[in-house]
Image (cartoon, grey):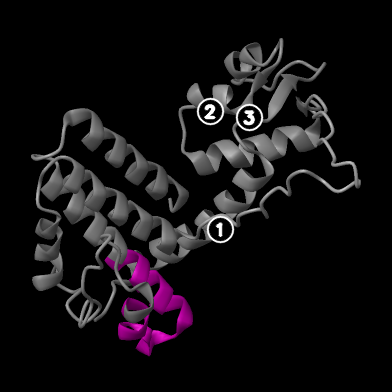
């Protein structure tokens, strides 16, 4: 299976952007409190800084941002670096109660690493599968793609089946396309997963409630934003 040079370059670029988005989302979560700095806002950004004039959160700023998640997070990184946007200190959390022995009553769970794009595609497939089941539809309609993959993806999905929760074996897909080297194999794996998710969403659209379908499409768009 071959990818056009342009497609391969776009997917590789998307992978790099996805990694940047994962890093920045971890550093700048939506609940981060921010306030506009003392200097005049940069030209063209007056509306954004007006929103942050009296303090707001990055999630609120994101809601009025017109670009992609990648462009928003890189903008936040730049503006916090040059001092135009200030990150406010969160209110200190009250100390965790202790037992008489001095040990903590509860131990917080370890931090969860952000999912990579492959896992996020797979998680979205699982969500579509669950949504179909809850809507009383047959989740097996997703199998149509695996039985007759999109042209050019036949070898990528050779021997790949739909798991009981709607996920697929990503490692098997990667092995199927591994002949071109690690970077190209990952790019082709992401292309294959994207095609399957697109098919599953389209197939489910007519049997899912509108709100549920839109929520799934929104998750798909957010995932694509991280790769664009």
Using a 10 Å C-alpha cutoff, classify the residue at mark 2 as few (fewer than 14 neighbours), some (14 to 19) or many (20 or more): some
Height in image: 147 above or below 64?
A: below
Q: Nearer the viewer, residue 35 or 107?
A: 107
Q: Residue at x 15, y 40 (%)?
A: 135
Q: Which residue is mark 2?
A: 62
| Whole-number angstrom distance, CA of label 2 to CA of label 3 | 11 Å
Q: Assign the magenta stretch its main secondary structure.
A: helix
SS class, disc 2: helix
Q: Is residue 175 magenta?
A: yes
| Mark 3 → mark 1, Cα distance in angstroms | 21 Å
Q: Is residue 19 left or right of residue 94?
A: left
Task: Tell me which corner region of the image, top left, top right, bottom left or bottom right, holds residue 173.
Answer: bottom left
Image height of 4 relative to 66, above or below: below
**Residue that numbered label 1 is attached to:** 19
Image location (x, y in percent) of residue 134: 20, 42
| Residue 31, numbered circle | 3
What is the quadrant of the N terminus in the image?
bottom left
């Amino acid at each position: 299976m071959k990818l056009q040079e342009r497609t391969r370059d776009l997917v590789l670029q998307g992978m790099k952007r996805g990694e940047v988005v994962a890093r920045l989302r971890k550093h700048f979560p939506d609940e981060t409190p921010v306030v506009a700095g003392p200097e005049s806002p940069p030209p063209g950004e007056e509306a954004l800084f007006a929103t942050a004039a009296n303090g707001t959160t990055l999630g609120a700023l994101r809601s009025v941002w017109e670009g992609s998640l990648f462009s928003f997070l890189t903008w936040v990184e730049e503006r916090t670096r040059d001092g135009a946007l200030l990150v406010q200190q969160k209110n200190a959390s009250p100390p965790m109660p202790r037992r008489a022995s001095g040990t903590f009553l509860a131990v917080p769970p370890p931090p969860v690493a952000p999912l990579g794009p492959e896992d996020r595609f797979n998680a979205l497939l699982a969500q579509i599968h669950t949504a179909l089941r809850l809507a009383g539809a047959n989740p097996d309609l997703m199998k149509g793609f695996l039985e007759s993959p999109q042209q050019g993806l036949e070898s990528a999905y050779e021997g790949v089946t739909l798991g009981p929760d709607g996920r697929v074996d990503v490692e098997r897909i990667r092995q199927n396309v591994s002949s071109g080297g690690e970077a190209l194999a990952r790019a082709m794996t992401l292309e294959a997963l994207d095609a399957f998710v697109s098919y599953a969403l389209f197939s489910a659209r007519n049997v899912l409630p509108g709100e549920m379908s839109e929520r799934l499409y929104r998750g798909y768009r957010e995932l694509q934003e991280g790769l664009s």
